[in-house]
């Protein structure tokens, strides 16, 4: 049986996510129907369902000019159109970074951000929120010729003066070898657009794939947000070299400055030796050609510090031709299926591992919280049963005395509200400290300090130190937040234990947020910036406007980390509060049910036996609810990732 291509495996992943989101929705409705859905459980379910429905997988394609990158993207993703869609003629085709994805809220279109926005301080992320500043071209997804014509716009250029090129970040006096060629009229070519967003309902993009197509070294270096945000956050990076030239000086510069990964992320890097068809030589035997490709592969792996299996020789152009002409023999010779399989294994394996972990921990906690509510109900029924059985054969005065005792218990319980309120006040005060440490204002102040430090005269050689100091302070802030969270957790544990002892609750402090994880995220961000702070960029970094752009790119990425950390703290707080609210609510109901039972017994002799029978029936119903909860949650955690067969297989197969 043939191995599963990237397209097919991605399709299976999408089908699994859709099925999982549907099962979560059914679980949510079931919990609501049986009054087991407190605000914390509802929030947990909502986040998990949102993560499943909107989970994106980004694959970044990075290469110097003329490495056949756009042709490779055509071959892997767009061969179903039976023609080229991304511009792939000789010379520079992708002049600006291009993202291909799908948003159902936006009609099919190509949006282009003018290059002049580089002269303004806002980072790319903010420009995304201002759609009117982008030039929009509507797309007809059923017309391949119109699509291809529209996509040609990403290769448009402008001719500008050297001063304009300098202001836009494309001309540097100190590195003339990287500057664009000056024409006879003294003008130079720069991209017309800063960034392109393509929104189309391609089957893979609809399932959450995002393709990032980046231009060469000069353009990458000029856009810090691309370098320090988008590429490091991609789930896989495909770095494309030409098989006949191997690793050139500029290729090596891109790899060392922007792509080299930590050991734990090295598997997400794939290097493609493209254009192996240039080595197919009628004067050489197939064995000789193969030996030449193997040598180039081994040398490339050694230079880039990768395992040999991460360097994949292919011919994107022949792969595209083979798919368009349904030529199975040529497709095998192009080796495109080998690359697709490596992408499927690497990218999907990584995403599925992350989603599996999110699913496992969230469903487990959700089940614990719902089981706790059932436990409270079971215990309350048991208490009522003991009370009612103790009334058998007793006279009216005993029953009146029982009623008075329940009312006294209820009064004492109502008086406990002040103690619980005091606990909540201390909890919220400590929580505010955590929110301040992780809040937007704290981060803005750090970014302002960094910007001021980078504007100091003679900072050129102290840039790394300025960044290191900023990250040290950010880490210290996170550690303080972690310490305060630990204090809150200790307080919650002690308070819950006391309330359990005094009022028979079964409160349990929810799992403390793992803020150390965000410290590791900070380390990764710092490393991606440090790669960028090398000697080759020292002169750029000495320019205030460029340093400002880099700080804004950093702020964009940090905001995502801090918002995630705050979200986790908020959910933790909500879980503790919702648990307490649920048990207070159940206890009040319990008092009401006990008083109602006494009233019924006082009114009718048969009421006692009827009420005992009712409680037995409710206990049986709770057992059934518990069993159903176990069945629904274990089904969610045990559903195999690729168990669901792709519903849209025929449509996907066209693109495979």
Image: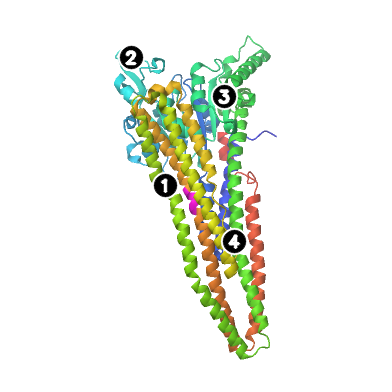
Query: Which region shows up in magenta?
Result: 566-570
| Front-most of residues 84 and 571 | 571
Q: Image check: 134 left or right of 413?
A: left
> 10 Å neighbourhood of mark 2: few (<14), some, or many (≥20)?
few
Which residue position is annotated with label 3? 272
Which residue position is annotated with label 2? 183
Tell me whether circle 3 and circle 2 mark residues in contact (CB < 8 Å): no
How far is the residue under mark 4 from the one under mark 3? 50 Å
* Secondary structure type for disc 2: loop
Q: Earlier along the polypeptide chain: callout 4 or callout 1?
A: 4
Residue 320 vertical placement versus 359 (above, below): above
Q: Image check: 291 left or right of 103?
A: right
Between disc 3 and disc 1, the foreground one is 1
Tell me whether circle 4 and circle 2 mark residues in contact (CB < 8 Å): no
* Secondary structure type for disc 1: loop
Residue 319 vertical placement versus 113 (above, below): above
Tell me whether circle 1 and circle 2 mark residues in contact (CB < 8 Å): no
**Residue drawn at the location 61% of the way across and 65% of the way down:** 374
**Residue drawn at the location 43% of the way across and 46% of the way down:** 105
How far is the residue under mark 1 from the one under mark 2? 50 Å
Tell me whether circle 3 and circle 1 mark residues in contact (CB < 8 Å): no
Which residue position is annotated with label 1? 439
> 10 Å neighbourhood of mark 3: few (<14), some, or many (≥20)?
many
């Amino acid at each position: 049986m043939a191995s599963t291509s990237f397209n097919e495996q991605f399709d299976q992943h999408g089908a699994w996510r859709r099925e999982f989101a549907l099962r979560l929705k059914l679980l949510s409705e079931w919990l609501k129907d049986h009054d087991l859905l407190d605000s914390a459980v509802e929030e947990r379910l909502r986040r998990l369902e949102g993560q499943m429905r909107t989970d994106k997988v980004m694959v970044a394609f990075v290469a110097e000019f003329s490495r056949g990158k756009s042709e490779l993207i055509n071959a892997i993703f767009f061969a179903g159109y039976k023609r080229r869609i991304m511009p792939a003629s000789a010379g520079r085709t992708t002049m600006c970074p291009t993202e291909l994805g799908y948003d159902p809220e936006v009609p099919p279109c190509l949006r282009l951000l003018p290059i002049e926005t580089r002269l303004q301080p806002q980072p790319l992320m903010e420009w995304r929120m201002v759609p009117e500043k982008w030039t929009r071209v509507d797309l007809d997804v059923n017309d391949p010729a119109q699509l291809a014509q529209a996509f040609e716009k990403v290769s448009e250029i402008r001719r500008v003066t050297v001063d304009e090129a300098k202001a836009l970040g494309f001309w540097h006096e100190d590195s003339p070898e990287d500057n664009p060629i000056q024409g006879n009229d003294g003008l130079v070519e720069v991209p017309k657009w800063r960034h392109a967003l393509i929104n189309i309902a391609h089957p893979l993009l609809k399932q959450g794939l995002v393709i990032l197509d980046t231009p060469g070294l000069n353009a990458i270096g000029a856009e810090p947000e691309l370098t320090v945000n988008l590429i490091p956050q991609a789930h896989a990076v495909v770095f494309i070299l030409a098989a006949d030239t191997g690793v050139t000086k500029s290729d090596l510069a891109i790899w060392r400055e922007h792509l080299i990964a930590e050991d734990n992320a090295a598997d997400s890097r794939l290097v493609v030796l493209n254009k192996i068809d240039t080595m197919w030589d009628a004067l050489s035997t197939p064995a000789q050609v193969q030996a030449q490709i193997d040598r180039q592969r081994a040398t490339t792996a050694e230079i880039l510090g990768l395992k040999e299996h991460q360097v994949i020789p292919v011919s994107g152009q022949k792969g595209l031709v083979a798919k368009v002409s349904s030529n199975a023999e040529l497709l095998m010779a192009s080796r495109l299926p080998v690359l697709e399989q490596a992408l499927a294994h690497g990218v999907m394996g990584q995403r599925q591992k992350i989603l599996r972990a999110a699913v496992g921990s969230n469903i487990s906690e959700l089940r614990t919280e719902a089981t706790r509510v059932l436990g409270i109900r079971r215990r309350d029924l048991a208490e009522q049963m003991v009370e009612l059985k103790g009334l058998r054969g007793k006279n009216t005065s005993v029953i009146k005395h029982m009623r008075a005792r329940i009312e006294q218990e209820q009064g004492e319980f109502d008086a406990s509200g002040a103690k619980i309120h005091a606990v909540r006040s201390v909890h919220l005060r400590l929580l505010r400290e955590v929110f301040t440490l992780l809040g937007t204002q704290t981060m803005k102040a750090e970014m302002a300090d960094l910007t001021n430090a980078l504007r100091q005269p003679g900072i050129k050689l102290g840039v790394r130190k300025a960044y290191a100091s900023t990250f040290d302070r950010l880490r210290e802030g996170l550690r303080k937040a972690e310490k305060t969270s630990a204090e809150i957790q200790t307080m919650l544990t002690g308070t819950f234990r006391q309330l359990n002892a005094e009022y028979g609750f079964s409160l349990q402090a929810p799992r403390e947020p793992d803020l150390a994880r965000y410290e590791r995220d900070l380390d990764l961000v710092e490393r991606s910036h440090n790669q960028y702070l090398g000697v080759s960029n020292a002169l750029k970094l000495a320019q205030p406007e460029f340093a400002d752009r880099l700080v804004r790119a950093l702020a964009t990425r940090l905001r995502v980390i801090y918002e995630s950390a705050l979200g986790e703290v908020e959910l933790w707080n909500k879980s503790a509060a919702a648990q307490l609210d649920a048990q207070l609510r159940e206890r009040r109901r319990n008092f009401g049910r006990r008083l109602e039972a006494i009233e019924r017994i006082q009114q009718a002799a048969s009421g006692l036996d009827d009420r005992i029978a009712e409680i037995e029936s409710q206990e049986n119903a709770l057992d059934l609810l518990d069993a159903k909860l176990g069945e629904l949650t274990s089904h969610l955690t045990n559903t195999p990732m690729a168990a669901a067969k792709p519903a849209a297989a025929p449509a996907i197969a066209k693109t495979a």
